[in-house]
């Protein structure tokens, strides 16, 4: 987990539920321009369903796949930087 803690410090992210794996920085193309992608994962166990407010007793609220969000970060270096955050969807 040292990479996760270092990336959190560099990006100034306080949420402990965001996890960064080793080798999470990649270079690629977006809209024809070279850019830097940082991949992270947001994972947690919810307290209740956000739609019906049913409490999550005995894991009645479960993960229903993931969704990737592309978040623009302040420029670091010479390339535009994006955080690709894989978020859980619950049902």
Image (cartoon, rainbow, N blue to C red):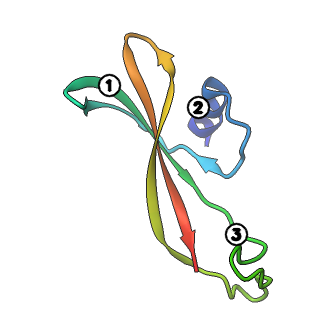
The earlier-in-sequence mark between 1 and 2 is 2
Q: Using the numbered discs, state the Cα–Cα distance from disc 3 to disc 2 in whole angstroms.
A: 22 Å
Count of all numbered marks drawn on residues in the image: 3
Q: Quadrant of residue 78?
A: top left
- The residue carrying mark 2 is 7
Q: Is residue 79 left or right of residue 21?
A: left
Location of residue 34 in the rendering, given as x and y in whole percent from the top left corner: 25, 23
Between disc 3 and disc 2, the foreground one is: 3
**Where, quadrant-wise, is the N terminus in this rendering?**
top right
Going 45% across and 60% down the picture, which residue do you hit? 67
Going 46% across and 49% down the picture, which residue do you hit? 69
The earlier-in-sequence mark between 3 and 2 is 2
Q: Residue furthest top?
A: 78
Location of residue 17 in the rendering, given as x and y in whole percent from the top left corner: 67, 52
- The residue carrying mark 1 is 35
- The residue carrying mark 3 is 45
Location of residue 82 in the rendering, given as x and y in whole percent from the top left corner: 43, 32
Between disc 1 and disc 2, the foreground one is: 1
Secondary element under disc 2, as helix, strand or loop, is: helix
Q: Residue furthest front?
A: 51
Secondary element under disc 3, as helix, strand or loop, is: loop
Q: Using the numbered discs, state the Cα–Cα distance from disc 1 to disc 3 in whole angstroms.
A: 33 Å
Secondary element under disc 1, as helix, strand or loop, is: strand
**Where, quadrant-wise, is the C terminus in this rendering?**
bottom right
Between disc 1 and disc 3, the foreground one is: 1
Going 77% across and 85% down the picture, which residue do you hit? 54
Q: Quadrant of residue 39?
A: top left
Q: Using the numbered discs, state the Cα–Cα distance from disc 1 to disc 2 in whole angstroms.
A: 18 Å
Q: Any mark on residue 9, and which? A: none
The earlier-in-sequence mark between 1 and 3 is 1
Question: Could you classify mark 1 by the number of other residues whose Cα lies within 10 Å: few (under 14), some (14-19), or many (20 or more)?
Answer: some
Q: Residue furthest left?
A: 32
């Amino acid at each position: 987990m040292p990479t996760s803690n270092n990336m959190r410090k560099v990006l100034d992210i306080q949420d402990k539920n965001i996890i960064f794996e080793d080798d999470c920085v990649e270079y690629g193309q977006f809209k024809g321009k070279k850019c830097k992608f940082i991949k992270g994962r947001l994972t947690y166990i919810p307290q209740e369903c956000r739609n019906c407010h049913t409490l999550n007793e005995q894991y009645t609220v479960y993960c229903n796949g993931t969704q990737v969000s592309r978040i623009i970060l302040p420029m670091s270096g010479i390339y535009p930087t994006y955080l690709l955050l894989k978020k859980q969807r619950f049902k």
